[in-house]
Image (spheres, grey):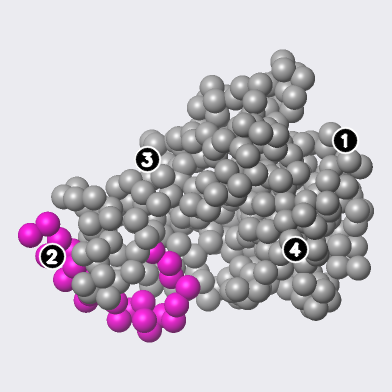
Amino acid sequence: MCAKKLQKKVCRDHGVKIDGNNIIMACGAAGALNVILKSILNPNDQVIVVKPYFMEYRSYIANCGGTLVEVCTASDSGNCFNLDIAAIQKSLTAKTAAVLINSPNNPTGRVYDAETLAKLSDVLLQHGKSCARYPYLIADEPYREIVYGTKVPPVLSAYPHAIVATSYSKSLSLPGERIGYIAFGNEIDDKENLTAVLIWATQVLGFVNAPALMQRAVAELTEARCNVEVYASRRSEFKKVLDAAGLKYIDPQGAFYIFAQVPKTGSDTAFSDHLKKYLILGVPGSSFAAPGWIRFAYCVNENIIRASADAFKKAMETWGK
């Protein structure tokens, strides 16, 4: 029932025509990713992941017998943390089962634009023709609805062998509520068998199915989303705090994180420990395969964000001394 009601939304968001059979309800994006990887991976298959990436990808891939292959993103200032298509192309092999992307990205807030996705699609199609195996493009999209002055381009219409995993815990501000879905287009290879295996993997992994009560709830909320303006206001306030403290950062296009550069006098873990002395919590970038950076979350009340200004200034003044 819920999958059928989601049909209209997925078709609109991704520019495709599908029916409810192309949508499988999941226990959040994490559950969806584990189901997808369990379904498509053979032992020692490779999954290309672009850095920085959500740290749990490592475990998801390893648990399904796969090998994670890290690829750097673009590093030039104007294009920082965008997909490096040439680097991805060099990493493709006959063992490549999938490329996993996350947009808006956790931790950077980067949104991969339509032109970049089109180039990635061309590379994956060329590779598939050359080795008779088309890698899946897995798009982890729990933050799709949380963007600032931009839109997340459609993935299912950009590449025929794409699979989307998403979650309502972010789009409806329901942290801890494990409800989401898997979606794919009609042109994907062996659609009937893929559907059957995804359902089987859901059962084998112990989910059985997504929570029935929450399926009924989100079925009535397919067009709803959280108040993004609240996140935008918090982002603005937090940027003022970091600017005043002298911390450089990537301006996030989506999600609710800011990825800041660690001042050049120590490691990201040491800087994170230093900030704790001033009651500031940040996750070291090395946890996301990006040493030298630190991730802050701004999904807190604006009064708390503004009140942190003095703590950030004092932390920066005493850092390295």
Q: CA distance from mark 4 to mark 1?
A: 24 Å
Circles 2 and 1, Cβ within 8 Å, touching? The answer is: no
- Amino acid carrying label 1: it is Asp
Estimate the x, y position of residue 48 in percent, counting from the top left: 57, 35
Q: Is residue 182 above or below residue 49?
A: below
If you read the primary sequence from the N terminus, does the residue marked by circle 2 or circle 1 appear first? Answer: 1
Q: Position of residue 262 (x, y in %)?
A: 26, 53
Whole-percent x, y for residue 138 in the image: 67, 43
Q: Which residue is mark 3?
A: 77
Secondary element at image label 4: loop
Q: Is residue 102 above or below residue 211?
A: above
Dividing the picture into quarters, in which one does residue 274 lie? bottom left
Per the picture, the main secondary structure of the magenta-coloured stretch is helix
Identify the mark at residue 190; answer none if there is no mark. 1
Task: Magenta stretch: give its range.
Answer: 296-321
Q: Residues within 10 Å of mark 3 (few under 14, many from 20)?
A: few
Q: Nearer the viewer, mark 3 or mark 2?
A: 2
Q: Residue flagged by tag 2: what amino acid is it? A: Glu
- Disc 3 or disc 1, which is closer to the eye? 1
Left/right placement of residue 250 relative to residue 111 reads left
Q: Which residue is mark 2?
A: 317
* Place of residue 99 in the rendered image (x, y in percent of width and height, measured from the top left): 62, 37
> Any mark on residue 207, and which?
4
Q: Residue 125 occupies which quadrant of the picture?
A: top right
